Image (cartoon, helix red, strand yellow):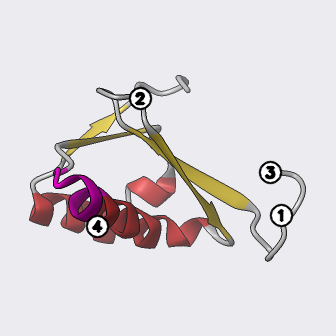
Amino acid sequence: MNTQARGGFQYFITFTDDFGRYGYIYLLRHKSKALEKFKEFKNEVHNQHDKSIKALRSNRGGEYLSQDFNELLKECGIVSQLTPPGTP
């Protein structure tokens, strides 16, 4: 976003369930908080819907390719799916 939202948020991250098309959006002050928000999302899915995340499809953004993010995905048995370069 070019404009800062209230609270100093400059970024957002979305998670969409491929089956039900239900979407979640989280506001971020820094892209480095993506892992923290994914953990929050993962816990919400587990606690509210009693489901587990099977795969995470991302756009090859650096925030999804960090060592910490990859370790969490492996630890939880979540498959990382990366979109081809140049696709949304």
Identify residue type, mark 2: Arg
Instruction: Say which mark, if any, is on residue 5.
Output: 1
Residue that appears at 41% across and 55% down = 64
Q: Earlier in the sequence, mark 3 or mark 2?
A: 3
Query: Pointer 1: residues within 10 angstroms few (<14), some, or many (20+)?
Result: few
Residue matched to label 2: 21
**Mark 3 crowdedness (10 Å alpha carbons): few <14, some 14-19, many ≥20:** few
Is 2 covered by the magenta stretch?
A: no
Q: Earlier in the sequence, mark 2 or mark 4?
A: 2
- Up the image or down, 47 lies above or below 62; here it is below
Closer to the observer: label 3 or label 1?
1
Closer mark to the observer between disc 2 and disc 1: 2
Which tag, 4 or 1, sits closer to the chain's start?
Answer: 1
Please report the bounds of the magenta region as a residue range: 45-52
Amino acid type, label 4: Asn
Q: Which residue is drawn at 17% across and 55% down?
A: 50
Farthest residue to the right: give it.
Answer: 3
Residue designated by label 3: 1
Q: Which amino acid does label 3 sit on?
A: Met
Task: Quadrant for residue 21, please give it.
Answer: top left
Q: Which residue was labeled with disc 4?
A: 43
> Looking at the image, is mark 4 or mark 3 nearer the viewer?
4
Density class for disc 2 (Cα within 10 Å; few <14, some 14-19, many ≥20) is few
Give the mark nearest the N terminus, 2 or 1: 1
Q: Between marks 2 and 4, how big is the CA–CA gap?
A: 18 Å
Instruction: Classify residue 40 as left or right of residue 3.
Output: left
Secondary structure beneath dot 3 equals loop
| Amino acid bearing label 1 | Ala
Q: What residue is shown at x 28% (from left), y 67% (from top)?
A: 43
